[in-house]
Image (cartoon, rainbow, N blue to C red):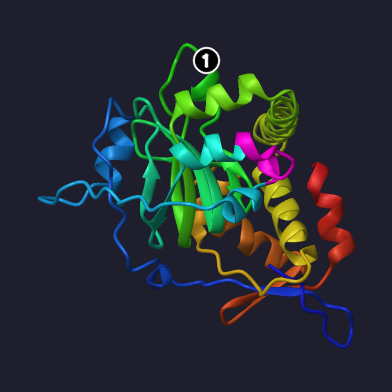
Amino acid sequence: MACVFGVQGIGFFRYPVSSLCRRAVKPVARETGICNTASAEKYAVPGGEAEQRRGMGIDQRELKSIRLFEGLSAPALRELEAVARIISYNDGQIITLEGESEASVLFVVSGKVRVFRTNQQGREQTLIHLSPGEGFNMPACFSEDHTAPASAMAVGGVRLISIPNSGFRNVVCGNPEIALEVLGDFSAKLRHLTGLAYDLSLLTVRARLAGFLMTQSQTENEAPARWTHEEIAAQLGTVREVISRTLRSLVKDGMIRIDRQRIVILDAEGLESETES
């Protein structure tokens, strides 16, 4: 999601204005355990069966691609290798549903994963986007509640390492180094969620949208991102109509311009000043 600078230093990234740009692939709900009914209904294929991706074997090179496992000893890696599997999902498919029982610990090998919560009316709140090397569902491994704390969806094609709760817990308990890495991961996610709670509770939608636009424009070394109104709304804790109205307000105030399927930031300083309003 890179910012591409023009001759006058104006950054932009792509933005599909039409709702027709939604993904064509229909997500598939996994009917395992007791899940959030709104999520299950929203992502279920009518009349279809839940799709279970068959796991494939894994080698130590793939395990070492995950930050938590880089420094593990050979015996610890062999212990993980015995229980870990590679699983794959296509764009838009549900990986796990909030409330799913005994959800495995998962680590991203390639692709990206969107983690989110859904209320009973079907409205979503994106919690985090995960990149290769990052993991999720670890709280279910160490708490009394072994259900998945949130839903996760593939963004593009995704390959994951799947490790059963018991196998992952055994490795962590027997290896202080990885236990410290897990604590570090928990700490980073707690800091992220604390920031998210602040944004949702204390900032206006306009401030959140301004911060979102600035963040997207400043991301380096990636192609411009494509976002729909609905996806931005889920990211910022609001609804599509409010996002459309706020974008029009920013256009009226001369801070951005919507040019075909992209947003051009005209007044970066002014947009930055809006982020704490």
Magenta residues, start to end: 67-76
Relative side of 56 to 206, left or right: left
Q: Residue at x 70, y 71 (%)?
A: 222
Examine the image and state in which quarter residue 213 appears: bottom right
- At numbered mark 1, what does the secondary structure look like: helix, strand or loop? loop
- For this rendering, which residue is in front, 119 or 277? 119
Relative side of 5 to 1, left or right: right
Q: Residue at x 39, y 57 (%)?
A: 89
- For this rendering, which residue is in front, 253 or 227? 227
Looking at the image, residue 105 lies above or below residue 275: above
- For this rendering, which residue is in front, 160 or 7? 160
Relative side of 275 to 8, left or right: left
- Residue reaching furthest left? 47
Location of the N terminus by quadrant is: bottom right
- Residue reaching furthest top? 144
Image coordinates for residue 266, horizontal then vertical, percent: 80, 73
- Amino acid on which disc 1 is placed: Ser
Q: Residue at x 39, y 46 (%)?
A: 95
Tell me which secondary structure the magenta stretch mostly adopts: helix
How crowded pointer 1 is (Cα within 10 Å; few <14, some 14-19, many 20+) is rated as few
Is residue 186 at least partly visible in the picture?
yes
Image coordinates for residue 72, horizontal then vertical, percent: 70, 38
Is residue 234 at least partly visible in the picture?
no
- Residue reaching furthest front? 75
Relative side of 185 to 31, left or right: right
Image coordinates for residue 256, horizontal then vertical, percent: 73, 69
Image coordinates for residue 199, horizontal then vertical, percent: 70, 36
Total numbered badges shown on the rendered structure: 1
Which residue matches tag 1?
143
Is residue 59 magenta-colored? no
Looking at the image, residue 259 lies above or below residue 232: below
Examine the image and state in which quarter residue 195 appears: top right
